[in-house]
Image: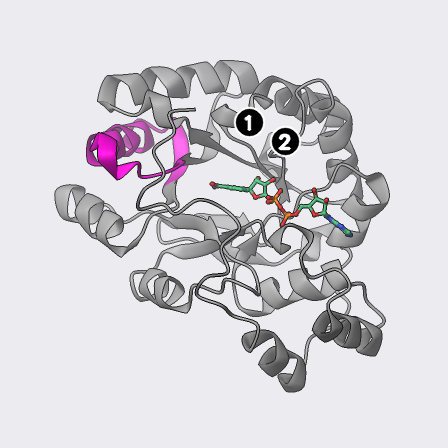
Amino acid sequence: MINEQPRIALNDGNSIPQLGFGVWQVPNESAPAVVGQALKVGYRSIDTAQGYENETGVGEAIRASGLPREELFITTKLRNGLQGYDSALKAFDQSMERLGLEKLDLFLIHWPMPSANLYAETWKAFVRLQKEGRVASIGVSNFNEDHLERIVGETGVVPAVNQIELHPAFQQRRLVAFNAARGIATESWSPLGRGQFFGHPVFAKIAAKHGATTAQAIIRWHLDQGFVVIPKSVTPARIAENFNVFGFALDAEDRAAIAALDDPKGRVGPDPASFDVRF
Ligand code: NAD
């Protein structure tokens, strides 16, 4: 049931649906139909970004759904090339125009891009946007411990969320523990590990045991760990499949088998310490 969807409490008093829908690589022209499908099967949280160039299509889907605004949780992220205090404020306004929203639920700094040395100044703009009531929650993405320490040190404001690459082959236990110790919710991106577990014997066994699919078993793992999770698909049947994960639970044997898949070199995306593409 949609109303029974689990939510994760954030450190600022707000809460986020634990299972959301990611829209990276969903073309703007397909976004109304794809996001519309996700909203139809029950997702209420949508994860987009300025860099995905589909905020307009996401906004269209939101309006077409007819759902009350308060039922929805919309996240977008600041482009790397638009970091900086004034630039972030202006970019926020432009996102809101594209999305057609008065208020955003969550705004994230997409990458720290440490070589530009602008993320702390950018965070100050985020703090202002939150104080002004333009955005309910502010957070970061791809921040390591040192980046988090710096923004908290300079502003005293702890991000509500750190959205990081996280899947069974790259479990990031140290950063997850660091987030938890500071009350920062961990949100998993590329939660399915971009397809590498389909056909994997560990997941074939777990899926068969629970009458689930591999994707459902992986999403269940994220939920059981307390992560916010945002799988993506453009295929209607898979969009529905990935949401149908509330009727079973993994057991200790499953958790141990998945824990053993962790690999410090298991990243599928860029390393945040060096990634500095100004998309
Ligand atoms: P994902 O792990 O969600 O995998 C998506 C791919 O897996 C799909 O394209 C599809 O090919 C396949 N798939 C999905 N459901 C399936 C199913 N039921 N059966 C079989 N195959 C299935 O990867 P992702 O899109 O990289 O990540 C999810 C979301 O995370 C993105 O859409 C985006 O919102 C977010 N993200 C954020 C960052 C960041 O830097 N903050 C980076 C990457 C992704």
Local crowd size for mark 2, using a 10 Å CA cut-off: few (<14), some (14–19), many (≥20): some
Q: Residue furthest front?
A: 265
Please provide percent x and percent y for residue 117: 20, 33
Please provide percent x and percent y for residue 249: 70, 74
Residue 118 visible at all: no
What mark, if any, has residue 52 been given in the picture? 1
Which residue: 78% across, 57% down?
A: 244
Depth order, front residue of 56/175: 175
Q: Earlier in the sequence, mark 2 or mark 1?
A: 2
Q: Is residue 253 left or right of residue 188?
A: right
The magenta segment: 109-138
Which amino acid type is marked by label 2? Gln
Please provide percent x and percent y for residue 12: 35, 49
Whether disc 1's CB lies below 8 Å from ligand 1 is answered yes
Local crowd size for mark 1, using a 10 Å CA cut-off: few (<14), some (14–19), many (≥20): some
Whether tag 2 and tag 1 are in contact, CB under 8 A, the answer is yes
**Picture quarter with the N terminus:** bottom right
Q: Secondary structure at mark 2?
A: loop
Is residue 133 one of those drawn in magenta? yes
Residue 38 visible at all: yes
Which residue: 63% across, 31% down?
A: 25
Q: Is residue 117 left or right of residue 88?
A: left
Depth order, front residue of 246/267: 267
Q: Secondary structure at mark 1?
A: helix
Which residue: 49% across, 46% down?
A: 269
Residue named by callout 2: 25
69 w.r.t. 21: above or below: above
Q: Residue furthest left?
A: 154
Q: CA distance from mark 2 to mark 1?
A: 6 Å
Instruction: Please state the quadrant of the image where ligand 1 appears.
Output: top right
Is residue 171 one of those drawn in magenta? no
Q: Residue furthest bottom?
A: 253
